[in-house]
Image (cartoon, rainbow, N blue to C red):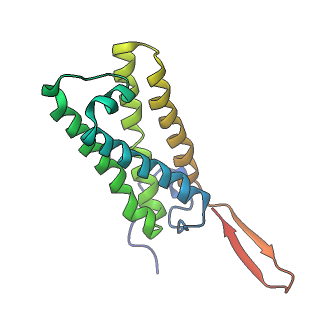
Amino acid sequence: MEDSRSNKHLPRLFEQGLNATLKKNSPLFWFTLVISVGIIGIGIDFILNPVGASTGYGIPIHDPAAFPFMWIKGIRDIFAGLVVLPFLWRGDRRTTAILFALSIFVPFGDGLVILSHLGFAPPIFIHWGTALYMMVVSYFLLRKPNIVKVVLTGGEAKEGGF
């Protein structure tokens, strides 16, 4: 039976292998999970420690009147991490890939904020490095899975890959 979701509107890169399951023993699963869990941790840090977290972000905020904005950023970060997790945990490669790829705009945009305020200061490399990491992981999530058949000594074949 054909999948009810049509891939005709997606570019060719997106068509390849998006219906495959993302397994928990796959490196791609863990490469995706590390960003999702990490951004949840950063969000919690912004809520509990707005001064330290904003300093780590690259724009230190010490005025308590600005803390609500830091808490809003914390909530945004927690949501950004949580939104991917159910699809990742379920192994839904298609939805995980699309959400993860779209999420690249957040660290890229954060880097633009740093660039406009501090220039090419060290925090920009954290934000844009994260965006680059996410682009690489997204590429592998969106491409056709590499299925490798391994012949065991007993003669039976197993499929694996990521």
The spot of residue 121 in percent (x, y) is 46, 16
Q: Is residue 129 left or right of residue 109?
A: right
Q: Quadrant of the C terminus?
A: bottom right
State the residue at coordinates (37%, 64%). 86
Q: Is residue 149 above or below residue 84?
A: below
Q: Is residue 75 left or right of residue 56?
A: left
Using the image as rendered, state which of residue 6 and residue 104 is in the foreground: 104
Residue 12 seen in the current view: no
Q: Is residue 96 left or right of residue 51?
A: right
The spot of residue 85 in percent (x, y) is 39, 60
Using the image as rendered, state which of residue 124 and residue 49 is in the foreground: 49
State the residue at coordinates (33%, 30%). 52
Q: Is residue 161 above or below residue 71?
A: below
Q: How many marks?
A: 0
Image quadrant in which you'd find residue 53: top left
Q: Residue furthest right?
A: 153
State the residue at coordinates (85%, 86%). 154
Residue 17 seen in the current view: yes
The spot of residue 27 in percent (x, y) is 61, 57
The spot of residue 117 in percent (x, y) is 33, 14
Q: Is residue 104 above or below residue 93?
A: above
